[in-house]
Image (cartoon, helix red, strand yellow):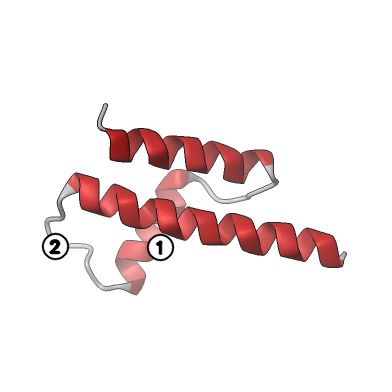
Amino acid sequence: MSQSRENKIKCFDRYIIRGGDMTLHEIETSIKETLDITDVPLKPDVFDDFITLVIEKLTEHKIKADAND
């Protein structure tokens, strides 16, 4: 497994532990659809690194939302 993929999985695990409610597949699909790149071949490591950043932001938003409840 590449380092990028391993980082993505670890980051996703933290997201789930903190109460995240999306699957990894849902996050990846949503990003591809939002950026209109569903049919564009992507370098797996680059995409994994980008998804890791997205998951980190989702986790931050989840933590902030929980703190405000």
Q: Quadrant of residue 40?
A: bottom left
Quadrant occupied by the N terminus: top left
Judging by the rendered image, the residue that carries numbered circle 1 is 30
Residue 66 horizontal/vertical position (percent):
80, 59
Residue 17 horizontal/vertical position (percent):
66, 38
Kind of element beneath mark 1: helix
Q: Is residue 30 above or below residue 6?
A: below
Which residue occupies 70% across, 46% down? 19
Judging by the rendered image, the residue that carries numbered circle 2 is 40
Which residue occupies 38% across, 54% down? 51
Give how far apart the Cα atoms at labels 1 and 2 are.
14 Å
Using a 10 Å C-alpha cutoff, classify the residue at mark 2 as few (fewer than 14 neighbours), some (14 to 19) or many (20 or more).
few
Q: Could you tell whether 14 is left or right of 6 in the image? A: right
Kind of residue sitting beneath label 2 = Val
Q: Quadrant of residue 27?
A: bottom left
Which residue occupies 12% across, 56% down? 41
Q: Could you tell whether 44 is left or right of 54 in the image? A: left
